[in-house]
Amino acid sequence: MPKLLSVVIPVYNEVETLPELIRAVRAVELEMEIILVDDCSTDGTRELYHQLEPQVDKIILHEKNMGKGAALRTGFKHATGDFVVIQDADLEYDPQEYRLLLEPLLKNHADVVYGSRFLGGRPHRVLYFWHMMGNKMLTLLSNMFTNINLTDMETCYKMFRRSSIEGLEIEEDRFGFEPEITAKLARRHLRFYEVGISYAGRTYDEGKKIGMRDGFRAVWCIVKYGLGFGKQ
């Protein structure tokens, strides 16, 4: 029987945080399935799966590291819920806020809901100024090509009606996924909403993975997919 929500979790070298993250997701009182896609972790994460298996619904292993976009592409194919949400494994985002994201969907106001770190009212860890500015500039550039007024295109928390992403071909293997899926969903003329979320960001010493190279790739992806190139 289909679940209300499919939680797709891309995992790469998260041995320190994954057990706590799974407990946090399971603590959310919603009917859901948890799908882990391990992108060829090498830090001992894979040795955890025998103890995590009773708590999750599906564990899918990539035999080579391909990137976050590739892991999400795999996870979406296995999702059966009415709605799908992306959840990073690093504890930066709070699963208790799934209900905030679900509300516009359940009220049939939206087809896609993004959790914005830049809409106020919820706690935020204070970190890198230039990282924040980079996110805002990428969001502005994305908005110019999609003609939608998001405040946080790069957020992890993206929730969709599963029907809204059916047939959508994800081409980007790494962090280019974020502008790609935003552009492709915008071209489908879906109803977008944003809700403010909390954010407990990590430092690079604590395992943050995105870097300057990913920022340059994001610009390329914004232009490419914003102009309608690539598979739709």
Image (cartoon, helix red, strand yellow):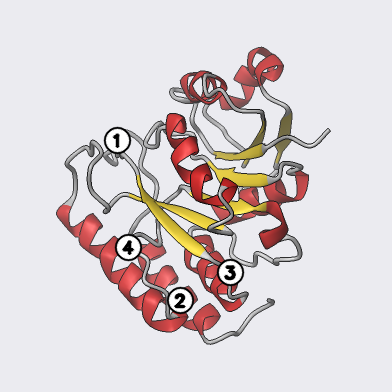
Circle 2 Cα neighbour tier, 10 Å, few/some/many (<14 / 14–19 / ≥20): many
Q: Secondary structure at mark 3?
A: loop
Three-letter residue code for mark 3: Leu
Q: Quadrant of the C terminus?
A: bottom right
Instruction: Say left or right for 10 vs 208.
Output: right
Residue under label 1: 200
- Residue found 35% across the figure and 59% down from its top: 152
- Residue found 45% across the figure and 49% down from its top: 156
Is disc 3 in contact with disc 4, using a CB cutoff of under 8 Å?
A: no
Which is more N-terminal, label 1 or label 3? Answer: 3
Circle 1 Cα neighbour tier, 10 Å, few/some/many (<14 / 14–19 / ≥20): some
Nearest the eye: 42 or 71: 71
Residue under label 3: 190
Closer to the camera: disc 3 or disc 4? 3
Three-letter residue code for mark 1: Ala
Instruction: Say left or right for 68 vs 220.
Output: right
Which is more N-terminal, label 3 or label 2? Answer: 3
Nearest the eye: 156 or 206: 156
Which is more N-terminal, label 1 or label 4? Answer: 4
Which is more N-terminal, label 2 or label 4? Answer: 4
Q: Secondary structure at mark 1?
A: loop
Three-letter residue code for mark 2: Ile
Q: Secondary structure at mark 4?
A: loop
Residue under label 4: 151
Nearest the eye: 104 or 146: 104
Decide: is 126 above or below 139: above
Three-letter residue code for mark 4: Thr
Nearest the eye: 167 or 195: 195
Residue under label 2: 222
